[in-house]
Amino acid sequence: MNTAADLLASGPAQLLPARQLMAFTLASHIILVPLGVALPFITLVMHHRGLRKNDPVALLLARRWSAVMAVQFAVGVVTGTVLSFEFGLLWPKMMGRWGDVFGLGFGVEAWAFFLEAILIAIYLYGWRRLKPWTHFWLATPLPFAAVMGAFGIISANSWMNTPRGFVLDAAGKPESVDVQAAVFTPMLGPEYWHFVVAMFLTAGYVVAGVYALGWLRGRRDRYHRLGFCVPFTVAAILTPVQFFLGDNIARQIYHKQPVKFAAAELVWNTGTHVPEYLFGRLQSDGSVKGGLKIPGLDSILAGFSRNTQVTGLTSVAAADRPTPAEANLVHWTFDIMATIGSLLILLALWYGLCWLLSRDLPKSRWFFRIAAIAGVASVVTVECGWITTEVGRQPWIVYQYMKVSDAVTPTKAASLWTMFGIVVVVYVLVFGAFLTVVLKMSRRWRLADSGLGRPEDEGPETETPYGPRPEPAAVGTGSTALRAGPDSRRAPGDAE
């Protein structure tokens, strides 16, 4: 509320609806990004296992995940395309002035998108139409296309945080553009690896969480065990890696964007022996209300010593730094992200220890309850990470070169609010359609596995994709179980 009041008071009328519209579309789109970036890799891991071990259950899972991948990609195209238009529509002065400098990242993302679309089409078409290993190898570029798209968008975002690769002329316009310097900015490495690992980790927990729910409901067959183990193992391995990457990016922000670091840690005045606040709220006089104060810890985290000097928010003019309300938002999202990340490490250790000691899954139902929640929790960390990145940069849209209020469109605020309302309605419909399709597929597969599905309800991905074709359906036969033969029906539900 305070942030909205600050924006209404300090900027043009268009600023608030423009920021709300951008924030809404970004927050909505990013929910789909983990599956878009990492599901192809997880699917191919399962696909490879199925081919290498001649495992029909693994192949069935890979085929079904590829169907989800296609639906997710289609919806992601809609939400991502809207974002592309919004950059030009809402922030025309930024794109007009700086587009030649940092626009290459969007170009890379677009080419990666087209490549990914072609590869997904080939992969989906190839089931039953290509030789098994030919089909698999033709799909192997798919994960690379996905992470290449992430590289393009993170390149553009890291440039907005640490702009490089240009010289300003007398009128303040960029010239002598150095494309390499503009792409490989100081924050690109930390941001990119932190983001990519977050996407793989989140997708792993989300997919595993679906099968953890099935496990809790008593479906303890090999289908659910394998569907849980492969994505969860990917996520569990990456969780401690992400801990070190998160620590590294926080330290990079300390060095390269000290005011953003001050906002994330609620540091008001520059000094040493700076305390760490777990949650708490920054007041307008610089004091912190509530939260848990740990003396000296922030200096230690920043430079491994209590004597490390940490720059405070008051090191720059009030107009050039996040407001207390914005700093509180950044601080809370940063702390939520760190807290969930720490809990996920404990979950990964629980899983890893059980596997090392007994070569089996944990027996506790609490493990699977928490594993089911981990999928949603990791999506929350992704949202928190983006809020920390974007709000922590305020009031700058291009750090220390252009403020958000200077880049906003001259379009009337009423028009932007109307557009905001339309986008909300459209997104509700799009995400509702996405959930409906995924839930229908899930229900259809569940019925097919139990032998209760009707032939017209069962899609092609309900059968093992390779191997002998099923016999043609006999007249009057009531289920694909009979058409596909006993081997096909038995595969998903094979007991341990």
Image (cartoon, rainbow, N blue to C red):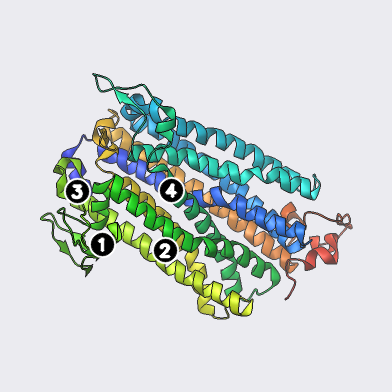
Describe residue 72's horizontal placement relative to residue 304 as left or right.
right
Q: Which residue is mark 4?
A: 28
In the image, what residue occupies the spot 70% across and 55% down?
47
Q: Which residue is mark 1?
A: 305
Mark sitting on residue 402: none
Of 234 and 461, the residue lying toward us: 234
The answer to whether mark 1 and mark 2 are in CB contact below 8 A is no
Give me the C-alpha separation between circle 4 and circle 3: 25 Å
Give the amino acid at mark 4. Answer: Ser
Residue 309 sits in quarter: bottom left
Mark sitting on residue 323: 3
Give the foreground label among 1 and 4. 1
Examine the rendering and report whether any part of residue 264 can be seen. Answer: yes
Examine the rendering and report whether any part of residue 217 can be seen. Answer: no
Give the amino acid at mark 1. Answer: Ser
Give me the C-alpha separation between circle 4 and circle 2: 21 Å
Above or below residue 55? Residue 313 is above
Q: Earlier in the sequence, mark 3 or mark 1?
A: 1
Secondary element type, mark 2: helix
Give the foreground label among 2 and 3. 2
